[in-house]
Every structure is written in C-alpha cells, then in structure tokens.
Image (tube, rainbow, N blue to C red):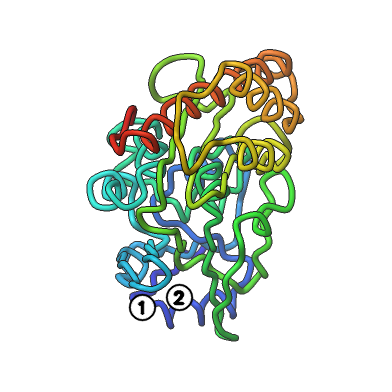
Amino acid sequence: MEFLRPTTLAEALALKAGRPEAVPIAGGTDVMVELNFDHRRPGALLDLTRVGELAEWSTVDHSGGTVRLGAAVPYSRVITEVGESVPALAMASRTVGSPQIRNRGTVGGNLGAASPAGDTHPVLLALDARVEVASVRGTRLLRAEEFYVGVKRHALAPDELITAVHLPANAGPQQFAKVGTRNAMVIAVCSFALSLRDGVVGAAIGSAAPTPRRAREAEDFLAAELPWTAPEPLPDSLKRRFGDLVAAAAEPIDDVRGSAAYRKHALAVLARRTLTWAWEEHRTGERACA
C-alpha cells in the first residue's frame, strides 16, 4: 500500500480528494490493529501526524466560550490541557487504554472509527458537540448526533477529513462513567455521560446500542424534574426513574464482554451515580467526583 505523508492540512485535503479510498491515520491505535489482523487492506494510508494544524486546540470566546479541539490532539493532552474546560472529556480520556495509547490516540481517531464502544462518544453527545469536517470543497459542522449513522459508520463524505471537535467550555457539572471487565486497558461493556447546564440535561450512552446515542426521554424527564433554582438533595425515586429511562434508551446485545441484561442494569446504576455527583456539584460548586 502507499503511504502518503502531507505536512499541511491543504495538502492532506488535496491528497484525500485524489485518493478518497486512503485511510487517515494519526495515532494508529485502531487502524494498526485492523491491519495487523488483516481486517483491512487499503490501497493507501494518509498519515496526518505531520499536519500541525490538527494537533492544536483553542478557546473561542463567544456564547460562553467554545473549545475547538484539533482532531489529532492526543488524549494525554486532553487530560492535562483541556480538563478544566471540558472535564467530562478528560474523564473519558483517562479511561482509554494505557499511558502509551493515551499518548497516541485521539478524539478524531475515535470519531473516525465510529465504534459504538468508543469512550469519548457519549461525552460528545451529552455536550451537544459539533464535529468539524473539511475537504477541498470547504468546511462544515455536523452535530455529534448526525455523525454516527451505523455500526462503525459515520457521515463523512469519501473526500472529507475530521479536522476538529467544537465543545462548550465550562458548561456546568458533567460526568462520565464506564463499566469494563477489568480496571484498565479495556473496551467498555457500557458507558454513560451526563451534562447539567442552564436547565438543560445531556445524557448519552455508549457500547449499548448500534451507535452511541442520547437518552432523550431521560433528558426531558430530568430537565423538568430537577429543582434548578432551589437545589436540594434529590430523592432516590427521581434517581431511580432517571436510571430506568437511561436503560430504556439502550439496545444492547449479548457478547463476550457482557449480556444485554447486564448492560441495561449497569447503565441504570451509572446514571444514578453520575446524577448524584453532578447534582452535588451544582448544589455546592465543588466537583464531587472526577
């Protein structure tokens, strides 16, 4: 196979336009596994590691602030550099693989793989992130909900590359939690992200449906029931109902990592726990768990 090595974004987009079948590679933590097991044999790899524009992030000061995170910023930098602005993304990044994987893997790569079990997907959904994609034809923004179209399938056109993710900065209490078969270097059995901001609830599940997805009914229920202006401890009945609605949003399968029934049960537990932590932060102003 050919190995294409652009040094600028413009060059990368031109190469992708001319070779739409070329597979982008940055950290390589997913692509190299597929190549090593002969699950994929593309005609060309498009190496993005020398494209400096993709490894940058910035804060745009409008509408309360937005973090524009370059697609090739590794998880380790998300944790240390972006964690204060987008804590849930840092929480999810901490659960990815080993330190070596976190030094190489990227949110852009997670999106490109579009696996239902990708760790950052629930956070992007709960925060209503926008995915920036580009080609020689121009740039467009996709809502995270629009990006996932099937099992390991995304909404990119053949000539497009993921260039960045846009997330709200300092957007209120947020949490991420994950269940795995062990404590480290594990694919999620299921995962959950929660965001509480300005009377709006974002709740999303991972590894429990054909695509990562928002739990819309659970979001609407919680937004209507939370005592936003006079915060007080939440009754267990409200937490249980929220957990039940989150579990109901899932369409899990039985596989080697866990049963469908267990995934639904675990999601309900994660929803109750993350709600407890996030609401405590809303009440006290102190982050209860990270």
Q: Residues within 10 Å of mark 1 (few under 14, many from 20)?
A: some
Image quadrant occupied by the C terminus = top left
- Look at 55% across and 41% down and name the residue there: 122
The furthest residue to the bottom: 137
Front in this rendered view, residue 108 or 90: 90
The amino acid pointed to by label 2 is: Ala
Disc 2 target residue: 12
Tally of numbered discs: 2
Q: Which mark is residue 8?
A: 1
The amino acid pointed to by label 1 is: Thr
Decide if residue 1 is in sight here.
Answer: no
Percent position (x, y) of residue 126?
A: 55, 46
Q: Would residue 259 be found to the left or right of residue 197 on screen?
A: right
User: Which corner quadrant of the image does residue 96 belong to?
Assistant: top left
Front in this rendered view, residue 267 or 8: 267
Front in this rendered view, residue 175 or 256: 175
Q: In 3D space, how far apart are the residues under numbered discs 1 and 2 (Cα atoms)?
A: 6 Å
Q: Which mark is residue 261?
A: none
Looking at the picture, does residue 177 appear above or below residue 2? above
Looking at the picture, does residue 118 appear above or below residue 242? below
